[in-house]
Structures are given as structure tokens and as C-alpha cells.
Amino acid sequence: MNTTLKSRLIIGCGYLGRRVARRWIDAGNQVFALTRSSDHADELSALGIQPVIGDVLSPTSLQSLPATTTLLYAVGYDRSGDASKRVVYVNGLRNVLAALPDSVDRIVYVSSTSVYGQSSGERVDESSICEPTSEGGQICLDAERLLQDKLTGRIGLHILRLSGIYGPRRLIARIDALRAGQHLTSHPDGCLNLIHVDDATTAVLTCAERDAGRSPVTLVSDDCPIQRREFYETVAKLVDAPEPTFAPPPNEAPDLGKCCDNRRLREEWGVNLTFPTINEGLPHAIGEL
């Protein structure tokens, strides 16, 4: 295989991105990752990832991005920073697209199911209307539209709308709250959509090797949307915490969320989930703490 086909760039090399990087490296790929911090650069180097110092909010720092063929864009929001979420997600993405090397022929963009505004337990898939009710959901949708406006017909594009990622070290705050007997302020009957980080990694790797076809959008969620009550009851049992109690805000209409349909992920992309439900995923995630 041509070595240029083994060169990847990750922008947003965090909880998900580092797992993708590890599997790309194990398969013989050369992997670069953008980072703002020299400390993070040292961490990336120790993992076999080649760091590139730069910032999506600084166009001049992006002028020498490496000539790779694949870009995984998985930038999260750093609440400790000064920039707003819109500036990071939309303006930062625009800066990267303007500096994109000509060698890049496929982008895998990590978005969110927050682009859907359904709140009565409706089932949603890639064709469902997107009318987000949260500011964050609208920002994610605007970033998706920017990508499609700039790249359709030019570069292969996958937009992966991820449900809530869980996995090792991602449940610590929830476990501490349950053990402390704290009331949960959300509605117990609301629907949770989840994806184990290892399965999200597999989705990224699969899409990075294939054309998107009829639509760039894929929902990445596990097989079984679950009520919030059942999720927290399961976590509590696994960590020997008290049974969870819920105290949703009074006088508010309950937000029952939506239920994500992952059929495209399974049937079109052929992704076989290692953790299709929380019954498999939670014991693994908690056992790794």
C-alpha cells in the first residue's frame, strides 16, 4: 500500500481520538495530532503519535499541517478556555478547512445527537428533522452545515452523530454522586442514548476507510436506548451504591428525549458492537476504573 494512505491527522486527540490513534498505529499508520500544549505534545509522543503544535483558533498556527490523507476532527469544548463554544466549534472548524492540505481526501467529523430537538421519546434516525432546542445542539448543527457547504463534492465526508460516550474513567463523577446519595435532577423516565468508547472507535475506523454514499450522516449509538432510571439503577448495583433518587425541577414539562436508531451503523457499515447495551458495557467500564 502506498505510504501516503497510511498517514492520518487527528484534531481533538482526547478520550476518543487517542483510542483511534492507537488502533491506527497498531495497523501500521503514521498518526499526527494537533495540540496547543507542549506538555500534551510530550504525552502524544510517548504514545507514538507525532505532535503538531497549533490551535484551531489561530489560523497562522495551522499553515504547516502535515500532508495526510485522512482527518479525524473530534474537537471538544474546553470550559476552562476563554472562547465560546460557537467560536471553538464553528470558527475553529472554518480555520482548519481553510488550511487543509490538498492531500486530505477524507474527513471524519465527530458531531452529536444534540442536533435533534425531539423530546417526547420519539425514535430518530439520519433522516429525522433537526431542530435543536439547546444552544450546543444548534452550534453542532451549524458546524455540520459548514462542513457540507464547504466539502460536498470535493472531499469524502463522514459526519458521525455520537450519543453519549461512556467507558473507563468516564463514570467517576456519576459513581461518586450515587455513592453520596445525591438526588439526580433529571427526569427518571427520560431516554438515554449511549455508545461505549470502544465501539465509537470502531465506527470512526470503519468510516475512515469507506465512502459515505447517499448521505454523510451516521448515528453512532448502541442497540438499546434506555430510561435514565434503569441506567442509574444498574450503575448503583455495580458499585454497591444506594438506589438512586430523582428530584427533577418542579413545574417543568418532562423532557423525555429521543431514542436513536443505529440501523445504518450496523446494516450499511457492518459495525458489530462489542458493547451493544449497557449490560455489556457498564461492567467493562466500571471494572476498568
Image (cartoon, grey):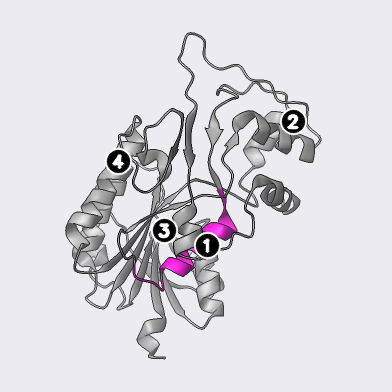
The residue type indicated by label 1 comes to: Thr
Query: Foreground mark, 2 or 4?
Result: 4
Q: Is residue 85 left or right of residue 153?
A: right
Q: Is residue 27 left or right of residue 232?
A: left
Q: Does the magenta stretch include residue 259?
A: no
Residue position for label 2 = 179
Distance between mark 3 and mark 1 Cα atoms: 14 Å
Q: Check disc 4: other Cα within 10 Å, few if <14, some if 14-19, many if 20+.
A: many
Q: Residue 12 carries which label?
A: 3
Q: Could you say where residue 184 lies in the image, as x and y percent from the top left?
A: 61, 23
Query: Foreground mark, 1 or 2?
Result: 1
Q: Tell me which corner region of the image, top left, top right, bottom left or bottom right, holds residue 213.
A: bottom left
Q: Check disc 3: other Cα within 10 Å, few if <14, some if 14-19, many if 20+.
A: many
Which sits in the foreground, 58 or 212? 212
At mark 2, the secondary structure is helix
Number of marks present in the image shown? 4
Q: Could you say where residue 92 lies in the image, as x and y percent from the top left?
A: 27, 53
Residue position for label 1 = 201
At mark 4, the secondary structure is helix
The residue type indicated by label 4 comes to: Ile
Q: Residue 139 carries which label?
A: 4
Specify the farthest residue to the bottom. 1
Residue under the image location 67 percent in, 23 percent down: 182
Distance between mark 2 and mark 4 Cα atoms: 34 Å
Residue under the image location 55 percent in, 64 percent down: 19
Q: Which of disc 4 and disc 2 is earlier in sequence?
A: 4
Residue under the image location 38 percent in, 83 percent down: 5
Q: Which of disc 3 and disc 4 is earlier in sequence?
A: 3
Whether pointer 1 and pointer 2 mark residues with C-beta atoms closer than 8 Å, the reply is: no
Q: What range is drawn magenta here?
A: 195-211
The residue type indicated by label 3 comes to: Gly
